[in-house]
Structures are given as structure tokens and as C-alpha cells.
Image (spheres, rainbow, N blue to C red):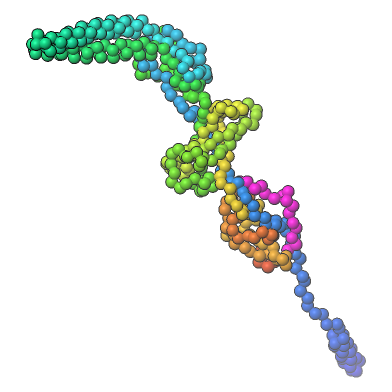
Amino acid sequence: MMRKFVIPGLIVVASIFAALTLMATSPHLEPSVPEPIAATVRVLEVKPESVQLTVHSQGTVAPNTESQLIPEVSGRVEWISKSLVNGGNFERGDELLRLEDRDYRSSLERASAALARAEAEHQHAQYEFKRLESLEARKLASRSLMENALRAYKVTEAALLDARAGYAQASRDLERTRIRAPFTGLVRSESVDIGQFVSRGNAVATLYAGDEAEVRLPIADRQLAFLNLPVGIRGELPEHLQPAVTLSAEYAGQQLEWQGRIVRTEAQIDTMSRMVHVVARITNEGQTTPLSVGLFVNAEIQGFTADEIVVLPRTAMREGNNVLVVDNDNRLRLRAVEPLRLYQDEVFIKQGLRAGERVCISPLQTAVDGMPVNPLPTSDSDRPATTG
């Protein structure tokens, strides 16, 4: 009986006593909170600077002056200049087309004969009037004869004026059989040939001037603010308000550039795109390569210069126009800023940052105000450009 109950009981008591002894003499473990590991972030030191703003657009080159070549008289074509072909060039005053002029020479001869007759009759009437005027002064001619002579003199004077106008008209019509270029330029298209009868008022060719070209450039309404143009201005811009523009295009395997000016804005806003159009004018004189009509070009318009601007990478912006500033204790602080412009991969800040502050430019997924970081300075060579 004793073996069955006492010995097992002593073993259980001894086990309990050993367990209590071990628990009482075991070391006490204090809980500890691990130090957070600071994230390494790239920072950019704030350096306010002056920034030259630019606005980009695209457009197609069009001639500044374009007109149709229209004969002022009718006739059969007897000669055409070699320049009057598609793409042909000419100088102001060059003869481009000649019409058969025999009928107009005949009209001029008849007008010349009518003028000679009117001059002779006018001289005779003038002589008779002065003769009767002298006789009347000596009481040798009646008043009625004097009035008839005066009337004949006035009639022949009017006939002389009419004959002179007819002669001038015939001379102009004869001159108009030789159609000359109204300006220096090129031929866009022509629709006439030798032997063809052309009528007065019907176009035979389309010409455009080559000294200047224009490009119509669409610009978003919000982009106009960067061009420093007065609000509400329409039409031709004063010369001192014309922004400079650089046009560029790849043509014949070369990258070409042309310099010009924005000379006017259009009054209406495009109802489909909600764009405002400005017109750039380029003078081909002095350009290395003349600007070709129909070429599609990229335009960079020079805006105003903004002072005290901080240029940051676009990744530095957080939701709600905020950036992360690293303080002197290397902790992140959320800062509200006022951006001037988002341009490509950059953001221009005009208010909210001071010179010397450090801005986090690393794309953190989770950023908490006061979070410790390990800032890694960015070299000046990695800074964004200062134009945009």
C-alpha cells in the first residue's frame, strides 16, 4: 500500500517543489522596444533662383501674304514666264503672263484720235469765246452770242476731260495685258497655258510671299499667364510685348531652327479644344535656311523671368501641394507650398520654402510627420534645369 501511494506522492511533491524553486530563482526579463531603423532618403537643398519660363506648342508654317493672280482684262494668252509654274520663284515687278494686245492697241489709237479731236474743238471754242468777250467789251457783240460761245466752250471742255479719261483707260487696259508679280515670292499653283482665253476677274494662279512666314500656335488658356501678355489684348501686339519664339523641325535629315516673334493673338477661343491661338512671324531674311511653307514645326515661346523660384523634381510633390522637409533632427516634416508651374518632370515652387532647407525627393510610399530619416545630399549636377 505504501509503495502504491506514498512513493508516487513524494515524487509529485518533489517535482512541484523543484518547479517552484526554478521559477523563484529564474532571471527577470525586462521588455524592450527596438529602435526604428531610419530610412535613407535623397534630399535637395533649397536654392531660390531666377527661372526663364517657356511655353511649348506646335503648328504648320503658312505664308504671311498669299493672293491670287487675276487678270484685269480679258484676252488670249500669248506668253507665259518660266517662273509661272508650281514652286517657281519671282521678284516683285517680274512679268509673269502676257495677253494678246492688238485689240487694246486699237482701242488706244481710237482714244488718242478722240483726244486730239476734243483738244482741237476745245481750242477753237476757247478762241471764239475770248474773241466774242473782246467784242462785247466794245459793244460790238450781243449778249446772246456771248452766252452761246460760253456754252460751246464749256461743252468742249467737258468733252476734252472725257477724251482724256478714255485715253487713260485705254492706256491702262493695254498695260494690263502684261501681268506682273505684285510682290517677291513663289507660285503655289497655276491653271493657265499658252493659247487659252482668260476672262477678266478669273484667277489664273496662286502666289505667296517668301520674305515672311507665319505659324498659328495653339496654347492652353492657363499657359498664357507665363507669356506676360496683358489680359484681354487682341490683334497685333506692340513690339515691346512680342515674345521671342524659336521654331525647330527635322528637315532633310537635319535639325533646323528659326528665330521669330509672337506678333498677335486671335480674338476667339477654339470651341473644340478650348485653346487660344497666337501667331508667330518669322522673317526669312537673315535666317540660315528659309522657312518652308507647309512644314510642321515645334515652337518654344519665351515667357517672363520669375524670381525666387525653387526648382524641384516632380517626385518631391505630395498630395495636396505638400512637400517633405527634413529638419535639423533629420526628421520628416510635412510642409504646404504654393507651386507656380508643373513643367515636364519638374515643379516650380514660388512660396513655402526657405533657402538652405532640405527637401526629400525620394518616392516614399509611407511618410509620417516626424519620421526619422537618413538624408543623402544630392549633388548640384543632379539638380533640375532652371528654365521651363
Residue at image position (66%, 59%) is: 355
* The quadrant where residue 236 appears: top left
Residue at image position (57%, 60%) is: 320
Which quadrant does the N terminus fall into? Answer: bottom right
Answer with left or right where residue 373 lies relative to residue 287: right
* The quadrant where residue 254 appears: top right
Residue 190 in the image: above or below residue 232: above
- Residue 368: x and y in percent read 66, 65
Residue at image position (69%, 65%) is: 327
Range covered by the magenta-colored residues = 373-388
Q: Residue furthest front?
A: 138
Residue 386 is a magenta residue: yes
Residue 376 is a magenta residue: yes
Residue 19 in sight in this render:
no
Residue 342 in the image: above or below residue 37: above
Residue at image position (54%, 30%) is: 283
